[in-house]
Amino acid sequence: MSPDPALPRIPARLAGAEPGGAPPPAPPPAPPSAPPPVAARARPAPRPGRILLWTFGLLAILFLLAPVLAVLPLSFSAGSFLHYPLPGLSLRWYADFWNSDFWLPALWNSLRVGAGAALLAGALGTLAAFGLWRGRFRGQAVVMAVLLAPMVVPAIIVAVALLLFFGPLGLTNSFTGLILGHAALGAPFVVVTVLAALQQFDPVQLRAAAACGASPLRAFWRVCLPQIMPGVAAGAVFAFATSLDEVAVALFIAGPAQRTLPRQMFSGLNDSISLTIMAAAMVLVLISGLLLLAVTLLRRAR
Amino acid sequence: MAAGVATPLKARLAAAALVAPLLLFLLGVFVLPIGAFLFRAVQESDVAPVLPRTVAALSAWDGAAPPGEAAFAALVEDLREARARDQQSGGGEVARASARLNADLPGFRSLLPMTARRVAAPFEGEARAAVLAISEEWGAIAPWAAIRRAGGPVSDFNLLAVLDLKRDATGGLGTAPPDEAIFRAILWRTLWMGVLATAICLAIGYPLAWLIATAPPRAVPWLMAGVLLPFWTSLIVRTAAWMVLLQREGVVNAALGALRLVEEPLPLLFNRGAVLLAMVHILLPFMVLPIYASLKSLDWRLPRAAVSLGASPARAFRRVTLPLSLPGVGAGCLLVFIQALGFYVTPALLGGANDQMLPYFVAFYASRTVNWGMAAALSCLILAAVAVILAVYGRLVGFSRMRPA
């Protein structure tokens, strides 16, 4: 892992994760001439303060990582207890996951809904970000507030509101309804990520394309889109991850046929915890790891 | 705007047209549904269709003494018709009105159907005497005041109820009776948990962000992975992990028992500490990442200049570095606090009955008791809190950095 490509991208990721205030995604990567942070100078003789900071920081990271890492191995247990030591190793809980009537379909539903939501949010969000980047128009601040609102409204409120609103429209207990709801929750992440990608795009290229006779649509499609594609893809991955993580909306508007994996886990946890849930957790962690990997590679591609 | 030389009208129209699809989409599946849902907080549609004459008769009533014969006669007529409609269609109109009135005045759930049943048979003489013969309760002010409050089309009943307030018969504001007055405590609990989670995240997150921002370059990806991996792990997985760790037969208790540190398994789950622990665990990356970003973009020559001009390192931190990193701190606190206000899944799974926060009660009213009015009023309360925090943040830090300017 080379450190540099990852660093300047953090602000962009942040802008994606939050409604306000992060440093603008625009600032160019710290110039290589920037003085090295204190640590570099302190390295020859680490001050006690640095040692304390490292100890504290590593403990904090341990706190972040340990809980999940501590329980995942339980999914390989040959017994059915939720603690160590394991009576033996087996894949029986994964077999249970694979053979049961609801776990595998739930995973399949999650992937379907996530893909649908990511496609919808990705397409609409990219267009909107391009529009916001192209020019100012009246009421832009209000429009921006609406576009980003799904990031600050608690999911439970969205869930109950959609239950009431989608009910009469026949969209509850349907994949369409769930995809629409999840796309709305994921769209702001696409907008912010694509806007960040567009900051790196030189608009003069669009004029050059126009001068060469390209229509605006063609200029966008052939000149702009290929260059911001990593950002678009990263935005879609965020939207997919949002959908994959979502419980409240799925809890309220999905029927038994649309149960997603987190929704199924929620029921399982409410009910009685079996180790199959740990197997499901392992599956989700692997998918999340793949998504993080995808986003990291996409950042590097930019 | 990056493109922003002078934007001619055509370009502005094109920009608006590109934004329109997402805007319309969000208006349709986000703004409109939430607006319609929140409107239910003030909407009163359960009682007026069932008791139209009674509501009309009470409109001129002063609420100081029980109403006169006209209201009783209207009630009898309304109940007879409603009961007939219910029997014809199986509609349950009386039941719905009783449920709404019972939320205001406990006892109505049985009083109204009972009265409806008994007045269905014809009687001689005054309606007042006949109704009072069915139940003395109709001789009081309270049931009539409840009917008038619920008469609609809109009322502040639910919005007041979530603030533990209630109007009396004359329309004056008073505190709700103690057994109904639970929501202020829940609101404070929600805010307090949010403040605690934010403070703990800040206390852990700032030093961690500082470490990552000042670590040797080759250590940074590893430290960053330690923050990003949990950040990307599903919330439900992290909540499940805490459940498995903390439950009675769980990992922690088994380990403590094996080490002979405890005789009996400790009750680690279903309490507020477990909820707070998991909240901090889940929200910590949201604090670390913005602070890291602002520390990373900070010009480290400035604190060093302060030190070379004679400031102690602590003073250089307090007067130079900390102020420069405040935008990140503000963004982190905003993110953590707003999300803490909306936490539903984690407290629902890890908390006990007394550890639930506002979102839980939104879900409770929406799914268990199907009281949309209260669910909407509680949602208004949460959104108001979110709006206040956003406004404070906008005033203190500003959103200008956010706009793609």
Image (spheres, grey):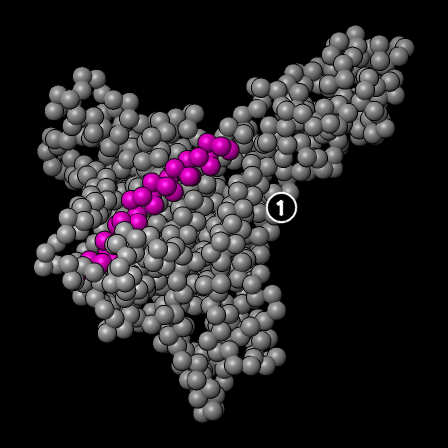
Please state which of residues A179 and A246 is positioned toward the viewer in this rendering: A246
Question: Is residue A225 found left or right of B128 in the rendered image?
Answer: left
Please indicate, yes or no, whether residue A149 appears anywhere in the rendered image: no
User: Is residue B147 on the magenta stretch?
Assistant: no
Whole-percent x, y for residue A141 in the image: 56, 63
Whole-percent x, y for residue A273 in the image: 29, 31
As drawn, A47 above or below B265: below
Chain of the residue on which disc 1 is drawn: B
As drawn, B165 above or below A69: above
Q: Residue at x 61, y 48 (%)?
A: B35
State the predominant SS element of the stretch in magenta: helix
Question: Is residue A138 found left or right of A35 in the rendered image?
Answer: right
As drawn, A11 above or below B337: below
Q: At label 1, which amino acid type do we have? A: Ala
- Total marks in image: 1
Q: Quadrant of residue B366?
A: top right
Q: Residue at x 33, y 69 (%)?
A: A230
For the record, the magenta segment spans B187-216
